[in-house]
Amino acid sequence: MEAKTTITIPEAYRVIIEDLRLLQRDGQNPNKMTEKQKASTWKSLCDFGWIYPIVTNKDGMLTDGEQRVDVCLEHSEFFGPVLRLPVEDVDRRILRQVLNKLKGTHDKLLDAQEFKRIKEAGGKEELQGVLGITDETLDRYDKLLDDAENEQGALLDSSFEIVVKCKDEPQQQERFGKLKDMWGEDVRILTL
């Protein structure tokens, strides 16, 4: 197996080496990486090897490690350790949320979509339990999703935004007014 990859694989992981090209994606992972983060991930894999495996469900649907898979494939590294867990789709999504919260940067709109799918699959209480989020927080994500549907029509369009943290609502209103005067219609308030 070692000849299939140039990345160091711990002895304990050698029995779970798989072809990364055969793993499946749902296209709904809210965790995204910048080019700089991808380069850092590749350097880490080269320097330290596979510290922990890719995680999938029993059918090979990615749960954790999608970016590592992408980085490896971009560098023609096609094999790595894959831990397949016997979990249902809703549990796979919850596990992805938990593991993504530990690392990476999140797209709140994609989070909102993922939370909606988890709730629709009956996983709301478990989601709240493992992430420690309240009904009010989920309501804010629902509102974000509704607002996005009403304002943009298309949920997954990329946009580049600036976030200004305010200590309270009056300060938020004041800063909003100043920014709106400078930039006009491209400024909006988002409270999370």
Image (spheres, rainbow, N blue to C red):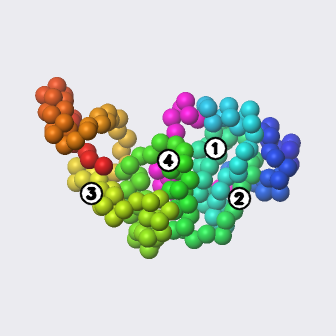
Magenta run includes residue 93: no
Q: Which residue is mark 4?
A: 31
Q: Which mark is residue 83?
A: 2
Q: Is residue 140 left or right of residue 4?
A: left
Reading the chain from its start, which is encountered first: label 2 or label 4?
Answer: 4
Q: Is residue 176 visible?
A: no
Q: Which mark is residue 26?
A: none
Q: Is residue 88 above or below residue 171?
A: below
Amino acid at circle 4 = Asn
Q: Are marks 2 and 3 in contact (CB under 8 Å)?
A: no
Q: Nearer the viewer, residue 108 or 24?
A: 108
Q: Are marks 2 and 4 in contact (CB under 8 Å)?
A: no
Reading the chain from its start, which is encountered first: label 2 or label 3?
Answer: 2
Where does the image place residue 169, in percent across and percent down from the top left?
Answer: 19, 43
Q: Nearer the viewer, residue 29 or 115?
A: 115
- Which residue is at a point 38% across and 49% down the rendered structure image? 108
Amino acid at circle 3 = Lys
Q: Which residue is mark 3?
A: 143
- Which residue is at a point 56% across and 60% down the rendered structure image? 95
Instruction: Characterize the local packing of mark 1: few (<14), some (14-19) or many (20 or more) Cα atoms within 10 angstroms.
Output: some
Q: Secondary structure at mark 2?
A: strand
Q: Which residue is mark 1?
A: 68
Work out how far the residue at label 1 is from the one at label 3, CA to CA, in angstroms: 32 Å
Q: Quadrant of residue 60?
A: bottom right
Q: Are marks 4 and 3 in contact (CB under 8 Å)?
A: no
Where does the image place residue 29, in percent across and percent down from the top left?
Answer: 50, 52
- Which residue is at a point 30% across and 37% down the rendered structure image? 165
Segment colored magenta: 22-38
Q: Secondary structure at mark 1?
A: helix
Reading the chain from its start, which is encountered first: label 4 or label 3?
Answer: 4
Q: Is residue 135 above or below residue 110?
A: below
